[in-house]
Every structure is written in C-alpha cells, then in structure tokens.
Image (tube, rainbow, N blue to C red):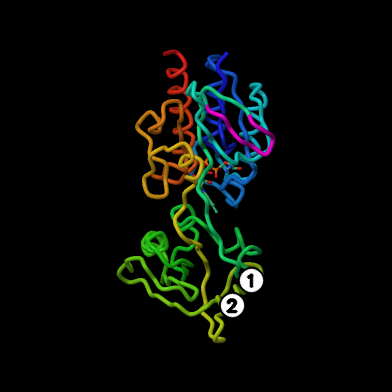
Amino acid sequence: MKQALIIGAGPAGISAALYLTRSREADVTVISSGSSALLKAEKIENYYGFAEPISGAELYENGLRAAARLGVRMLEGEVLGLQILPDMRFQADTTLGLQVYDAVMIATGSTRKAPKIEGLKSFEGKGVSYCAVCDAFFYRGKPVVVIGSGEYAAHEAAVLKATASSVTILTDGLPFTGSLPEGVSLSDTKIRCIEGERSVEAVVFEDGSRLETAGVFVAIGTAGSTDLAKKVGAVLDGNYIMVDRTMATSIPGLFAGGDCVGGLLQVAKAVSDGAVAALSITQFFRK
Ligand SMILES: Cc1cc2nc3c(=O)[nH]c(=O)nc-3n(C[C@H](O)[C@H](O)[C@H](O)COP(=O)(O)OP(=O)(O)OC[C@H]3O[C@@H](n4cnc5c(N)ncnc54)[C@H](O)[C@@H]3O)c2cc1C
C-alpha cells in the first residue's frame, strides 16, 4: 500500500487523515509537534455543529481521538527536513528518524510570532489574541491595540477598525513599514508590559506612559510556515505555500492545506482544505 505522510494534526491535517484513511488507498501517518493554533483559541463559536461554544483545545483533542479511532498512525515529533529522492518519493527527516513516503501533505499551520513582552503570554485568551477575524467580535465598542510593524499588523488593524472603538498599532520601537489604514493610530514607543487584573487593561510603555486597552492583538511579521515547502523547491506565494484548487503544490505528490496556504485562517476552511487534499492524494496514487 502507498505511504502518505501528513505533517500537522490541526483541523487541516486531521481532516485529510480521516478522508484518506477511509479511502483505503493509503497507509496514513500523521506527525505533529503539538502546537496547533487551536490550542490558543479560548472558545470557538463560529464552527458548524456545536450548539454551545467549544474550546480550541477540546476541538483539537476531539480531532486526535477521531483519527486514532480510525487507525491513523499518530506520531509526536517534528519534521525537520524534506527531500525528493531519485524515484520521486519523499524522504522526511524527523526528530523520530528518516522515513520515506509516496506523497506528503503539509498542514503545519502558520507561525504566529510573539514578541517577548511581559504579560503577553499570561493574558493569552484573556485579552491577548493572535487573530483579528476570530476575536474582533469580543471587542465591539472597546479600544484595542495591534502589536506589529508591517502589512500583517495593518491588515489586522483594518479588520478591528470595523467593530472596535479605537485601534492603535504599536510597533514596539520598530519603524512601521505597512500602509496605515484610515482612522488607525500609530505609536513606535517601546513597550514595557501588559497590565490588568483578570484580563488586559492597559499597555505600559518604556517611557512610563500608559494606554488603556481591552484587547492586544499580536501581528508580528506574516504568518507562514513555508520552510519545508522551500526545501523541496515548491513555489511559494509570499509567506504561504502556493497550491491549486486541488491543494496540489508545484511538486508532484506534495500537497498542502489549512493556514499554511493562506486565505481564510479559520477552522472551517482548514477542514475543507484537508478533505480536498485527501481526495487529490487518492487520485495521485491511482495514476
Ligand atoms: C487565538 C486564536 C483564536 C482562534 N479562533 C478561531 C475561531 O474562533 N474560529 C475559527 O474557525 N478559527 C479560529 N482560529 C484559527 C484556527 O485555529 C486555525 O485556522 C486552524 O487551527 C488552522 O488549522 P491548521 O490545521 O491549518 O493548522 P494548526 O491548527 O495550526 O495545526 C498545525 C499543526 O502542524 C504541526 N506542525 C507545525 N510544524 C510542524 C513540524 N515542523 N513538524 C511536525 N508538526 C508540525 C503543529 O504541531 C500542529 O499539529 C483561531 C486561532 C487563534 C490563534
């Protein structure tokens, strides 16, 4: 039987594993370093099928359990490198050793970089967010800040502007390189810490000044986990992996889906990408 490797156990990877395993066309291995974006989501209330909000962690665990129930081989580890062998199969260099596969799907999510600012980590899910489109709803009519200095920060600020009472981009001492959306303020003062009782209340700057805020959105750099794709020469689209409508990359046998290919960075789209990729891998094996 053909060997398929899925890198990532978030919604995209698990969805692909479920479809591919049920097709009975492949022996499926999922490898995951265990850091899904879902684990940062305090509650999800925009995904089909849940009458009450579900925590990201619970949704993630449910996914793992569903895959295990179908007999998917689930490995905890990290893929460090990917190489195409002369017979066009893929060699994955992992923390568990070297393995060879007939097809690979990259479902590694996007890397959301976080600066080292006191209080940022401890307020995750309590006012600190990494996703404007996901959490803007919770800050309707309230002041928010976006930490970042480029186009990604500008994009998040533009999303938040529609619902928040005010939006300020904080570059934390860096020059701002994005295009500032109308009505959004900008500050380049260095940040000392995030303060609050039970949730975020203010950002305190190195010069001692304070900015009251209900939400801190982190948007450093641009999300994108393209290193593995780069290693086998797959074409990228900025910080995302370029795929066609079948989730195929520019390399035969290499597929990708979920946050790492860009577009809507949401569970619903990741699940769809995984299903499409699995059907494409099945067809690739039948050729
Ligand atoms: C704070 C927050 C709130 C959110 N709220 C919502 C919401 O309300 N609704 C919604 O629909 N979406 C929400 N999202 C977005 C949602 O979590 C993502 O869109 C979704 O998880 C993307 O799925 P994915 O499978 O592409 O990637 P991920 O879920 O990020 O999974 C990536 C997987 O790849 C693995 N991985 C990465 N690199 C490697 C490697 N080198 N080797 C092995 N494994 C690797 C990780 O361990 C993980 O298993 C939120 C995100 C955040 C951060």
Residue 2 got which mark? none
| SS state under label 1 | loop
Residue sitting nearer the eye, 256 or 217:
256
Residue sitting nearer the eye, 91 or 283:
91
The reply to whether discs 1 and 2 touch (Cβ–Cβ < 8 Å) is: yes
State the image coordinates of residue 26 (x, y, percent, origin top left).
55, 17
**So how many labels did they put on this image?**
2
Q: Which residue is mark 2?
A: 192
User: Where 126 sits versus 197, above or below?
Assistant: above
Quadrant where the N terminus is found in the figure: top right
Residue that extends furthest to the left in the rendered view of this protein = 182
User: Where 145 sits versus 260, above or below?
Assistant: below
| SS state under label 2 | strand
* Residue occupying image coordinates x 66% and y 26%: 73
Q: Amino acid at mark 2?
A: Arg
Residue sitting nearer the eye, 54 or 109:
109
State the image coordinates of residue 40 (x, y, percent, origin top left).
59, 52
- The crowding category of the residue bearing disc 2, from other C-alpha atoms within 10 Å (few below 14, some 14 to 19, many at least 20), is some
* Residue occupying image coordinates x 63% and y 71%: 118
Q: Magenta segment, which residues? A: 90-98
- Whether residue 57 appears in magenta in the rendering, the answer is no
Q: Is mark 2 within 8 Å of ligand 1?
A: no
- The crowding category of the residue bearing disc 1, from other C-alpha atoms within 10 Å (few below 14, some 14 to 19, many at least 20), is some
Q: Which residue is mark 1?
A: 118
Residue that extends furthest to the bottom in the rendered view of this protein = 208
Ligand 1: which quarter? top right
Task: Specify the principal SS of the magenta part.
Answer: strand
State the image coordinates of residue 244 (x, y, percent, origin top left).
35, 33
Quadrant where the C terminus is found in the figure: top left
State the image coordinates of residue 76 (x, y, percent, origin top left).
68, 37
Q: CA distance from mark 1 to mark 2?
A: 7 Å
Q: Amino acid at mark 1?
A: Glu
